Amino acid sequence: MLSWYHRGTMGSDRPADESRIELADHVADALAVLDAAGVRRCVVMGWSVGVMVAAELARRHPERVSGLMFVAGVPGDLFGAMLGSLGIPAVLRRALTLTGTHALRAISPIIDAILHRIPVNTVTATLAQRSGLMMPGADTQAVIRMLRRFVQHDGAGISRWRSRSVPCPRVICVG
């Protein structure tokens, strides 16, 4: 199994040219990882935003992908898909989520300043467990480790896909 961090997240350096975090750049990174490991063809799994990368890798380079597994993500237009469960029309969803993303980017230095000062301990772990974003029974020490990594993240660094465009087996997990 091979894995990597998207550019500018967690253990990965931010690109010198900060505009180089487009989907095509992430696909190029996936190819570089496969090439470095000598993998010519494989099943590709994407989780969250990685679903878009996996789907686009399969669409652009079908000779490299023998199967896909999607977990908790959306292939294609992420911004057009958000807020769909609220019944908001796709054209509005895209505008709302892009506006929200730009607003978050503008205030990210403030968010970072706050996040980096939040103490990570059993109290914050318990709050996270009861937030509804994870199962309340999650191991407290595991939650603390996850929160420590999360608060280190730098928020400032942040074709419609159709399944028939990818000629390989697919598994899609949602929930």
Image (cartoon, helix red, strand yellow):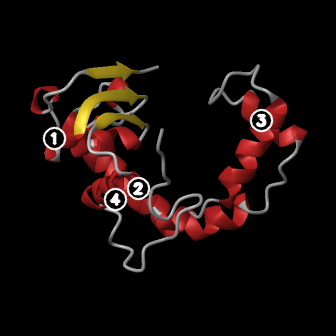
Q: Which residue is mark 1?
A: 63
Q: Is residue 9 above or below residue 113?
A: above
* Residue at left offset 74%, top offset 29%: 129
Q: Secondary structure at mark 3?
A: helix
Q: Residues within 10 Å of mark 1 (few under 14, many from 20)?
A: some
Q: What's the distance in space between the residues labelled 1 and 2, CA to CA?
A: 34 Å
| Residue 159 x, y percent position in the rendering | 13, 45
* Pointer 4 or 2: first along the chain: 4
Q: Which residue is mark 4?
A: 32
Which element carries disc 4, helix, strand or loop? helix
Q: Residue furthest right?
A: 122
The residue indicated by pointer 3 is 142
**How far apart are the two marked residues, 3 and 2, measured between alpha carbons?**
29 Å
> Residue at coordinates 11% horizontally, 26% vertically from top-left?
164
Instruction: Look at the numbered disc 2 and give the secondary structure of its residue.
Output: helix
* Viewer-nearest of discs 4 and 3: 4
Mark-to-mark CA distance, 4 and 1: 15 Å
